[in-house]
Image: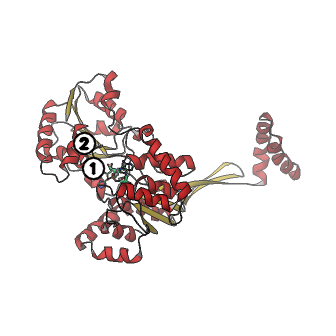
Amino acid sequence: MQKIKYPNKENWESLLKRPTQTVSDIEETVTRIFTEIKTRGDSAVRDYTEKFDKVNLDSFLVTKEEIERASDQVAEELKQAIALAKGNIEKFHAAQKTDRVNLETMPGVSCWQEKRAIQKIGLYIPGGTAPLFSTILMLAVPAKIAGCKEIVLCTPPDEFGKINPTILYTANLCGVTQIFKVGGIQAIAGMTFGTETIPNVYKIFGPGNQYVTVAKQLATKYGIAIDIPAGPSELLVVADDSAEPPFVASDLLSQAEHGTDSQVILVSTSEKLLNSVALEVENQIKALPRRAIAEKAIENSKLILVKTDLEAVDLINEYGPEHYIVCVENEDFYIENTINAGSVFIGNYTPESAGDYASGTNHTLPTNGYAKQYSGVNLDSFMKSITFQKISKEGILGIGNAIELMAEAEGLDAHKNAVTIRLKNLK
Ligand SMILES: NC(=O)c1ccc[n+]([C@@H]2O[C@H](COP(=O)([O-])OP(=O)(O)OC[C@H]3O[C@@H](n4cnc5c(N)ncnc54)[C@H](O)[C@@H]3O)[C@@H](O)[C@H]2O)c1
Ligand SMILES: N[C@H](CO)Cc1c[nH]c[nH+]1
Ligand SMILES: [Zn+2]
């Protein structure tokens, strides 16, 4: 990891740059694939699946038999772990339900707001280098609580045209309607336009690599809503001498192992802590099965020494990390001053992995600095708010003249007339 001592504020922008490619780097490829899938449907999906996933599939739809077989292949112990995680995610997301907002803004003018589920949604479940079945819990569980009717899932097949059994088991457990063996840009395009077999949806959810993330962003040009840009995983840890260096190193590596384009950052006012963690990272990385991936990500990663807690907080808010671990004595200061972050993990005994799997919070979070303007996925992501109003005779008498005057001032006589005609009727 590159160590940077007391960086100047003018250099923050380049210091805090992500290693990912930009939308413009990938957009041309994404646009080409979108155009082909829009015009050629399944046959183009098949071609791109062969090109990127190295398998030629007759059918993308996972069958009932495949789902049943998958359940037998998942160990009982893992099923119980999934059940525990599912329970916590259910509890935390069900608690996010809100009451209807109901108000009389003036006598006889009642306004209220209610939420309704988005009826047709698509979930992208990453499967390029690891089968992220935990992401199904993060998306399908709140979707069900919200009341989404049709839940389509796409995930890349392996070279034998198979999907990891735990993905199929979890999808079935969570009430996913249809599962398709399609990944990457072709999956997002399929759910955007619909093909002979893949239904189009109203909103696409889920993380993925850079191609998936840019494809989701492009889908919005075609009227599809997306959850958030949730690309390559990242983690920023702020720690002081109260932190356990081996714990901090293990957290940094937990996100570094996601992909070569992941980034992890350690910020501290203690050089001693930075050095101890760097040594620990070097040691722990050797034993990782995904060492090669983690090592690449560590090349993109940084140890940053700052002078004060205030400087640390400013730098962290400027970065807007997806995951943010606060492991310092003065934790309240950091928590109170957190403005931009996807999800925050506090203290020596809160590994980031807890949020990835089982604490109950959602792991689909904004990356690449998007925590400045986006929230992570939550119950509201699966719903729309609809406003209602009902005006009585008393109400229209009270509000009518203001509407008439405003409509007249905008030069919109038909708007004014819709009120005038009613007021006359009441005289
Ligand atoms: N931000 C979050 O909330 C969050 C959560 C979980 C995972 N993630 C991230 O998800 C990502 C998962 O990535 P992954 O690659 O393992 O799986 P993936 O399923 O996202 O992507 C695999 C697909 O990418 C496509 N692809 C690969 N190379 C391509 C190329 N050169 N051109 C076009 N398409 C190509 C293929 O179609 C393949 O099926 C990781 O970066 C991880 O950090 C993020
Ligand atoms: N850390 C990822 C979100 O960036 C989520 C995940 C799934 N499995 C393991 N981790
Ligand atoms: Zn993770």
Q: Is residue 243 visible?
A: yes
Reply above or below: 331 against 123: above
- Coloring scheme used: secondary structure
Reply above or below: 256 against 271: below
Residue at left 21%, top 46%? Answer: 294
- Looking at the rendered structure, which numbered label has been put on residue 49? none
Q: Earlier in the sequence, mark 1 or mark 2?
A: 1
* Ligand 1 neighbours mark 1 (CB distance < 8 Å): yes
Q: Is residue 98 visible?
A: no
Reply above or below: 237 against 158: above
Query: The disc labelled 1 sits on which kind of residue?
Result: His
Query: The disc labelled 2 sits on which kind of residue?
Result: Ala
**Pointer 1 with pointer 2, Cβ within 8 A:** yes
Q: Is residue 42 left or right of residue 376?
A: right
Q: Is residue 363 left or right of residue 77?
A: right
Marks 1 and 2 sit apart, C-alpha to C-alpha, by: 8 Å
Element on which disc 1 rests: loop
Disc tally is 2
Q: Is residue 73 left or right of residue 407?
A: left
Q: Front-most of 129 and 367?
A: 129
Element on which disc 2 rests: helix
How far across and how far down the image is residue 343, in percent?
A: 34, 47
Residue at left 20%, top 50%? Answer: 349
* Quadrant (top left, top right, bottom left, bottom right) of the N terminus: top left
Q: Which residue is mark 2?
A: 297
Q: Front-most of 279 and 24?
A: 24
Can you tell which quarter of the image residue 130 is in?
A: bottom left
Q: Which residue is mark 1?
A: 258
